[in-house]
Image (spheres, helix red, strand yellow):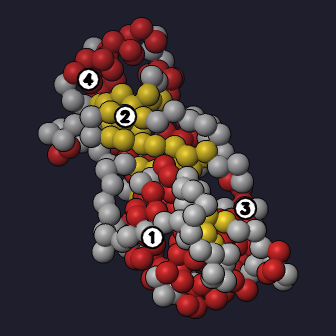
Amino acid sequence: MTADKRVSDVIDDFQRRGVYGFERSHLEETLSTSPAAGGKALTRLAAKGRVKRILKDFYAILPVEYSAQGMIPADWFIDDLMRSLAMPYYIGLQSAAALYGAAHQQIQQVQIVTPRQVRGIERPGLSIRFFCKQEFGATPLQSHKGHGGMIPVSTPEATAFDLIRYASQIGGLDAVITVLAELVEAMAPEKLADVAASESELAQVQRLGWLLDYLNQSPLADALHAALPANRATLPRTRIDPAGGFAGRARNRWKIIENAQPQSDL
């Protein structure tokens, strides 16, 4: 049996077991073959469109029905990929919001939050962007069923805070409020207050609260306001757009300097 046939058989077995991402070393261990022989066989199978290299030593398996697209959806292999990187993660931001029904602003990118910096992945038909979060471990998560198994996703309330935190990296306040306007349907006031209680950046609580008032989401905004420090008079004046100037009024209960007026695409 040729090396290509042996490698192809193992890949077929992976696929039958619902595994669509694998490390080259795992394949070589399964076959008890040399790295050189395994590498050459993978190169030939990649040329035939049977596998796709995602990273140097990580490959995705392409079923026949995806050969034309040249890539499978990321949720088919994302858990295996992050395990190969030995990196905790969760699906976040606009990618998480879309799973909760806030899909008006479609993005052709998978947004993942990690505790350390990870370089983004760009391949034809695939875009994965990583966001580093220092307080990663404090983020409430829930499991979502992906094609390849259960994957961790930030809760709707935690997603809202991440949208605020990384606003400048995902299209600004207009993009945030467009997603938030739909995400609020999945959010609960008491859960939002719980997330706020563990939030170390008070400015993010103020910004999210102001945006919720802006969207006339009083139950959510009131719950968030109740989570602010008891002495509200000590709240610092905070710009709704951190990149903007200090011009604008702050005559609101959040002490937000209204230096921008976000516009939703809805």
Separation of marks 2 and 4 at Cα, in angstroms: 21 Å
Residue denoted by label 2: 122
Kindly identify which residue carries mark 3.
201
Residue picked out by circle 1: 261
Q: Can residue 73 be seen?
A: yes
**What residue occupies the far right of the structure in this picture?**
231
Question: Circle 2 — which element?
Answer: strand
Q: Is 41 located above or below residue 152 in the figure?
A: above
The residue drawn where x is 55% and y is 90% is: 218
Identify the mark nearer the N-term, 4 or 3. Answer: 4
3 and 1 marks in contact (CB < 8 Å): no
Query: In terms of sequence position, does the residue under pointer 2 or pointer 3 come before the other?
Result: 2
The label nearer to you, 3 versus 1, is 1
Report the side of 212 relative to 200 (left or right).
Answer: left
Q: Which residue is mark 4?
A: 45
Residue drawn at x 22%, y 37% is 70
Q: Nearer the viewer, mark 4 or mark 1?
A: 1
**Residue 36, x across and y down, in percent:** 42, 8
Question: Gap between marks 4 and 1, in whole Å?
Answer: 52 Å
Kind of residue sitting beneath label 4:
Leu
Of 74 and 226, the residue lying toward us: 226
Check disc 4: other Cα within 10 Å, few if <14, some if 14-19, many if 20+: some
Specify the amino acid type for callout 2. Glu
Rendering coords of residue 1 (x, y %): 28, 16
